[in-house]
Amino acid sequence: MLKQQLQQKLQQKLSPQHVQYIRLLELPTLELEERIKHELEENPALEEGADLSKDLDEDGGDDDNIGDDSLSPDAAEDLSLGDYLSEDDIPDYKLREISERPAQKEDIPFSIGQSLHEYLLQQLGLRDLPESQFKTGEYLIGNIEDDGYLRRRLPAIAEDLSLQGGKTSEAELKTVLNIIKDFEPTGVGAYNLQECLLLQLGKKESTPAVRLAVRILTDFFDEFTYKHYDNLLQNLPTDSEMLRKAVREITSLNPKPGNDWGSSLDSAMNLVTPDFIVESHNGELTLSMNKRGIPSMHINTDYATLFRDYLANKTNRTPEMRQAVLFIKQKLDSAQGFIDAVRQRQETLQRTMQAIVLLQHEFFLTGDETTLRPMILKDVAEHSGYDISTISRVSNSKYVQTSFGVYPLKYFFTESMQTDSGEEISNREVKKIVKEHIEGENKRKPLTDDVLAAILKKEGYIVARRTVAKYREQLNIPIARLRKEI
């Protein structure tokens, strides 16, 4: 049985404008530039450049906006032109002012260097090989990864070639692969680290230390990997001095020969574009935002003519014209909403960074990481007036340029610890102390995590052994056994 009832419900929904603002807030500077370019291409009502109508209003121009009252009842939609632009023409002196503005400095183009695969193909072309071996070599080089290793097995590659109509045996593949292994950089084309190091030792002069290094990698690779030097001394006819020389020969090799051949394009992609710039002058900090690639935007003034024709001429209000005007209004709403979202994003980033600079004022003056105060998202939210989720979005994938380097915003968020005197300090200070002790340790008897915890306790830092181990791993420092030297 159907039944009608009245129910009151409270719901919270995000408006499309707020959703757009949230998405823009998460974007770093480079992605925001692409997003703005895309919006400028997709929306004809949005134009790049300064808003001249605002400049005109500041100079005393009349702002004769057309409001909703001029519309007929059958056109009740909000078509207010004054929300977007002014109908006044732009005076000549404004046009001259724009034309006389200095042009922005263009970025200097960079040339893309030769990649590893291109370098290998170049060396392949210098060999006098039959066409079948040359084609096989091209395919093998295409399977070599960026670090220089060929991790795919030859049977799988032979099967791929057979599916493409070629008949290449594993023996032929191995022959061509041995040719590639002779290319520069030495060690390229190896299956694993052991083979890569052996290939590099094979190109060196055959000295006693090199021969011993080959023997170690061939027969005692696991013992060498885990630095069981006592086992090596027991199983090899050598003394500590010769073993030390052999280990030095091995550690001087390149475990990833392809990494040195990254193209300049890869390097350019890895460059960080800071979102903020903090400068120190005579003990005073100045904060600015990097707006170099973010253009100013305004509404297209050409649409004013269509509004005049539709609103002023009643005979022109045909259904077709009405649909066109409604479409234009949709684009205008979208353009104005995007401009407002970008402006709101910039204001949010500015206020959030101001709060971070205030909380970490001493670090931005000195660059000493031990001066970092314990800071979490809640602290920045209280100082900036935003929600914790907003601060999280701002700090994600954003960078700040200082006089001491470029740092991600997440670098400044640290946990707090207490000393034995009850003073709150940042865990980054403890990490620095751990790193200093490890760097100054006796490499023949490295400091274990238990010993490091005891040292920290003597210095007034109450830290458990598992916490020391966690900090050491975060610093990418191996355990004591793997830091041991002869």
Image: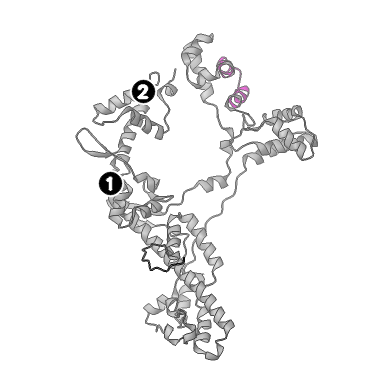
| Residue 430 visible | yes
The image shows residue 69 at horizontal and vertical percentages of 42, 86
Q: Which mark is residue 362?
A: 1
Nearer to me, 234 or 439: 234
Q: How is the image coloured?
A: one colour
Residue at point 34%, 31% (across, down): 467
Q: Element type at marker 2?
A: loop
State the predominant SS element of the stretch in magenta: helix
| Residue 302 visible | no
Q: Residues within 10 Å of mark 1 (few under 14, many from 20)?
A: some
Q: Which mark is residue 36?
A: none
Total numbered badges shown on the rendered structure: 2
Of label 2 and label 1, which has the lower sequence position? 1
**Gap in angstroms between the C-alphas marked 2 and 1:** 33 Å
User: Disc 1 marks which amino acid?
Assistant: Glu
Q: Which residues are magenta?
A: 196-217
The image shows residue 294 at horizontal and vertical percentages of 46, 61
Q: Element type at marker 1?
A: helix
In the drawing, does residue 78 fall left or right of residue 373?
A: right
The image shows residue 202 at horizontal and vertical percentages of 63, 22
Q: Nearer the viewer, mark 2 or mark 1?
A: 2
Q: In the rendered structure, are the residues bearing label 2 and label 1 in contact, judged by CB atoms less than 8 Å apart?
A: no
The image shows residue 431 at horizontal and vertical percentages of 34, 34
Q: Residues within 10 Å of mark 2 (few under 14, many from 20)?
A: some
Residue at point 49%, 11% (across, down): 233
Q: Is residue 203 magenta?
A: yes
User: Disc 2 marks which amino acid?
Assistant: Thr
Q: Is residue 131 above or below residue 9?
A: above
| Image quadrant containing the C terminus | top left
Residue at point 38%, 19% (across, down): 445
Q: Which residue is mark 2?
A: 448
